[in-house]
Amino acid sequence: MNYLDRNEFNYAPSPEVLEALKNFDVNKLCFYTRIYDEGKKSILSVYLAERYGVDEAQVLLGYGGEDILKQAVHYFLTEADGNKTMLIPRFSWWYYKSIADEVNGRTLEYPLYEEGDTYRYDLDEMKRMVLCHQPKILLIASPNNPTGNGLTPDELSELLADIPATTTVVVDEAYASFVTADTTYIQRLVNQYPNLIISRTLSKFYGLPGLRMGFGFISKELGRFIKYSNKYLGYNRISEDLAIAALQADDYYRNVARQMNESRACYEQEIGRLEGFTVYKSVANFVLVKYPIALKPALQKAFAEQEYKVKFMNEPGIDTHLRITLGRPEQNRIVIDTIKNIAHT
């Protein structure tokens, strides 16, 4: 089976990751890390602090980006002030609402606007909703899953400038490494604004969803959450080593991303021209495709016969869309040809 439905990685891990696994000292597993005695969380948080130019105390680690998001939502929606409201994008990962529901949170959706072959956030509308509802959390996905759009660092800064410190802004940047290699804005934003958490992961760009390692960056003013999130006895020591190896193999993953971009262009050129189809611009490792809904049964049957799984969206307003993970070139070619064959039937 070819899995192109959960934005996983259909390439091999980098040679650096394989080498780190091969050379891992299994005796490390017999002991907790001792780095906490130095006032630090992990060898990974130390590495990330140096790489991103952020104070080590402002680095968050978690069991995937999922864990960082869940920690933040649970923590802030259960504070003593009783504010349980969180704003999320209208079309976004179902998990955001789910983790708020776990603590009886109230989620409100701010709109995403479709404009031709792209979606966009409306900063003025987001600011208006924050002013009106005074949420405890404003959650932003950049790039957003499944629409593929995001905010530039300047747009994010413009938004943060008008968000009161009583609202914690959580930015899910799971796919951000596909956008640019420039991460200098992270240091600037977490040091400029007192209410910011940026969540990243090794699962998407670095292709290690099975590693379950996420990381993030946080404003110093949110020290109460930093203390809550830290793990006294440390983290998975294999995951620490492999995560550092992956981060050091940036050139390898940039090359994979380049191949994905070439395949994305094929979707735009070949599927985007079919009658009734739209391929939306995306800055992530997937494409969103609108298709004539009458073709759904035939598409589902054809993909099943090819042993390919893609994501048929079912949320209202986006239930005539497919989200397709950008796999290897030969996988993308089969998906494109399958869609074209059904469209021309």
Image (cartoon, helix red, strand yellow):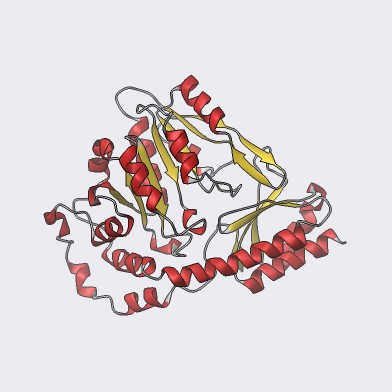
**Residue at 35% across / 22% down in the picture?**
82
The mark tally for this picture is 0
Residue 200 spot, x, y in % from top left: 41, 52
Q: Nearer the viewer, residue 254 or 292?
A: 254
Tell me: residue 47, above or below residue 80.
below
**Residue at 45% across / 49% down in the picture?**
173
**Residue at 33% across / 55% down in the picture?**
52
Tell me: residue 145, above or below residue 46.
above
Q: Nearer the viewer, residue 219 or 316?
A: 219
Residue found at the far left of this picture:
37
Residue 304: tell me if it is visible. Answer: no
Residue found at the far right of this picture:
345
Q: Is residue 163 left or right of residue 328?
A: left
- State which quadrant residue 261 falls in: bottom right
Q: Is residue 147 left or right of residue 213?
A: right
Q: Quadrant of the C terminus?
A: bottom right
Tell me: residue 4, above or below residue 106.
below
Residue 172: tell me if it is visible. Answer: yes
- State which quadrant residue 162 falls in: top left
Residue 73 spot, x, y in % from top left: 39, 37
Q: Quadrant of the N terminus?
A: bottom right
**Residue at 24% across / 50% down in the picture?**
55
Q: Nearer the viewer, residue 237 or 216?
A: 216
Residue found at the far top of this picture:
132
Residue 122 spot, x, y in % from top left: 58, 34
